[in-house]
Image (cartoon, helix red, strand yellow):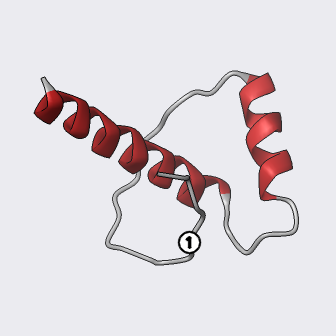
Amino acid sequence: MAFQLNTEKKETENKTIRFPLPLIKKIEAQLEGTESNFSRFVIQACEYVLKELESEIKKN
C-alpha cells in the first residue's frame, strides 16, 4: 500500500516528541506545496506503520 497524505482532522491530544533535525528537514521538504502539515504527516506515518505491523502479525 502506498503512503498518501490526507487532510482529515480527528480528535487529538498534545504529545512532546523530539525528532532529529535532518529528519525534520526531509519531512518538511516532502510537505512543500501540499495542504498537509508536520503533525498530520507524523500521524499518518504512524498509522501506516501500525497497519503494516498488524498485517505482518496476521501473516505469521
Q: Is residue 51 left or right of residue 7?
A: left
Between residue 45 and residue 38, name the one nearer to us: 45
Q: Position of residue 51 (x, y in %)?
A: 30, 45
- The residue depicted at 20 percent of the width and 38 percent of the height is 54
Q: Is residue 57 above or below residue 31?
A: above
Q: Is residue 35 above or below residue 24?
A: below
Q: Position of residue 50 (x, y in %)?
A: 31, 40
Q: Position of residue 20 (x, y in %)?
A: 69, 21
Q: Is residue 21 above or below residue 42?
A: above
Q: Is residue 40 left or right of residue 59?
A: right
Q: Is residue 17 left or right of residue 35?
A: left
Q: Quadrant of residue 13?
A: bottom left
- The residue depicted at 62 percent of the width and 27 percent of the height is 19
Q: Quadrant of residue 9?
A: bottom left
Between residue 50 and residue 59, name the one nearer to us: 59
Q: Residues within 10 Å of mark 1 (few under 14, many from 20)?
A: few
Q: What's the residue type where badge 1 is placed? A: Asn
How many numbered circles are shown? 1
Q: Is residue 5 above or below residue 44?
A: below
* Quarter of the image where the C terminus is located: top left
Q: Which residue is mark 1?
A: 6
Between residue 31 and residue 52, name the one nearer to us: 52
- The residue depicted at 74 percent of the width and 35 percent of the height is 24
What secondary structure is marked by label 1?
loop
